[in-house]
Structures are given as structure tokens and as C-alpha cells.
């Protein structure tokens, strides 16, 4: 699992293709985002990311994110 933290530039896959953005925070508890509930926990954290293109936020598992330079 990649190590990501707040401020990291990352890429992830969406139904429209690959998207880039920035990690805005680590989520360690249940959180609503985009009409879905992210079932994060301290043992299985997820990450809120903000799209560079649309400005929208989403929550993803670290395994779905790839750091970019």
C-alpha cells in the first residue's frame, strides 16, 4: 500500500479516466462524500482528495492512489 499524506499530489482512476489532484486529509472514521459513506477506521484509513480539474472532493483507499511528481 503506498504511503500518502496531506499535500501529496496523486492520481486515481475514475469512470471518465485517470484524474490528478491533491490529498487534503486522512480520514479515520465513517465519513460521507459524494452521496456515499466511506467506512474508514484508524486501522484502515482512507484519504480525501481534491481533483485539480473539477475541484470536487472524493475519498479513496491508499491502494487506489498513485503518487505523482
Image: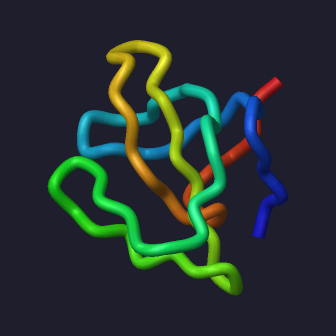
Q: State left or right for residue 30 relative to residue 36.
A: right
Query: Residue 25's x, y, as percent?
Result: 63, 45
- Hey, which residue is sitting farthest top in the picture? 53
Q: State left or right for residue 34 relative to residue 19.
A: left
Q: Residue at x 79, y 60 (%)?
A: 2
Query: Residue 61's x, y, as percent?
Result: 55, 65
Report the front residue among 16 and 51.
51
**Quarter occupied by residue 27:** bottom right
Q: Quadrant of the N terminus?
A: bottom right
Q: State left or right for residue 5 relative to residue 23.
A: right
Q: Residue at x 33, y 17 (%)?
A: 54
Q: Residue at x 38, y 63 (%)?
A: 31
Query: Residue 21's x, y, as percent?
Result: 56, 26
Q: Residue at x 78, y 50 (%)?
A: 4
- Hey, which residue is sitting farthest bottom in the picture? 43
Residue 64 position (above or below residue 22): below
**Quarter occupied by residue 51:** top left
Report the front residue among 37 and 51.
37
Q: State left or right for residue 18 relative to residue 37.
A: right
Residue 12 position (above or below residue 42): above
Query: Residue 41's x, y, as percent?
Result: 58, 80
Q: Quadrant of the C terminus?
A: top right
Amino acid at each position: 500500500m503506498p504511503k500518502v499524506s496531506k499535500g501529496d499530489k496523486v492520481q486515481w482512476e475514475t469512470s471518465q479516466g485517470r484524474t490528478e489532484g491533491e490529498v487534503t486529509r486522512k480520514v479515520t472514521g465513517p465519513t460521507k462524500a459524494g452521496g456515499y459513506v466511506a467506512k474508514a477506521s484508524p486501522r484502515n484509513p482512507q484519504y480525501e482528495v481534491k481533483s485539480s480539474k473539477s475541484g470536487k472532493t472524493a475519498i479513496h483507499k491508499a491502494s487506489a492512489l498513485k503518487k505523482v511528481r
